[in-house]
Amino acid sequence: MADKNQKHPLTAAGLYFTDDTCIDCDLCREIAPLVFKRDDQTGSSYVWQQPATTAEQALANEALHSCPTETIGTDAPL
C-alpha cells in the first residue's frame, strides 16, 4: 500500500496520491492519462490532476489496483 508520508512532491491535492516506490512502468499513465503524468526529473509517475468525473475516478481506481508496486494510494472509498 502506498505510503502517505512519502507522497510524490508534485502530487495534486486531493484523494489520490503516489509515493516514492514508483518504477516508471507507465501502466497508470496508460490507464488514466488525465490523472497521472511522468516526472522526468525523478523518472516516476505522480497524480497530476485529481479525477474530476466518475469515469476518471473509475480509471484511477483501475490504475491503483493494477499498479505492480502498489505505489498509488487513495483516501477515497473503493
Image: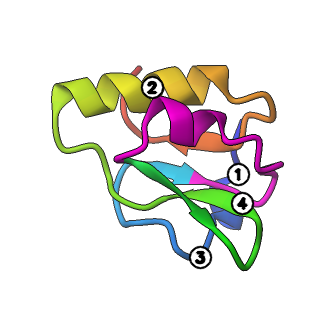
Q: Earlier in the sequence, mark 4 or mark 2?
A: 4
Crowd class of label 3 (few under 14; some 14 to 19; many from 20; radius 10 Å): few
What crowding class fits label 2: few (fewer than 14 Cα within 10 Å), some (14-19), or many (20 or more)?
Answer: many
| SS at circle 3 | loop
Which residue appears at 41% of the width and 20% of the height?
Answer: 78
Does residue 26 show up magenta in the picture? yes
| Residue 24 in picture, x, y percent from top left | 76, 50
- Residue marked by disc 3: 9
Tell me the distance, in whole angstroms, between the alpha carbons under discs 2 and 3: 21 Å
Residue 18's place in the image compared with 29, above or below, is below
Residue annotated with mark 2: 61
2 or 3: tag closer to the N-terminus: 3
Does residue 34 appear left or right of residue 19 in this picture? Answer: left
- In the image, the segment drawn in magenta is 18-34
Quarter of image, res 65: top right
3D distance between C-alphas at marks 4 and 3: 11 Å
For the stretch drawn in magenta, the main secondary structure is loop
Q: Residue at x 53, y 34 (%)?
A: 30
Q: Estimate the spatial distance between the alpha carbons at disc 4 and disc 2, rounded to whole Å.
A: 18 Å
In the displayed structure image, the side of residue 21 where residue 29 appears, left or right? left
Q: Is residue 26 above or below residue 18?
A: above
Q: Residue at x 42, y 43 (%)?
A: 33
| Residue at (76% x, 41% y) in the render | 25
Residue type beneath disc 4: Ser
From the image, tell me which residue sits under label 1: 3
* For discs 4 and 3, the disc positioned in front in the rendered view: 4
Query: What kind of element bears circle 1?
Result: loop
The front one of 58 and 15 is: 58
Circle number at residue 44 = 4
Name the amino acid, label 2.
Asn
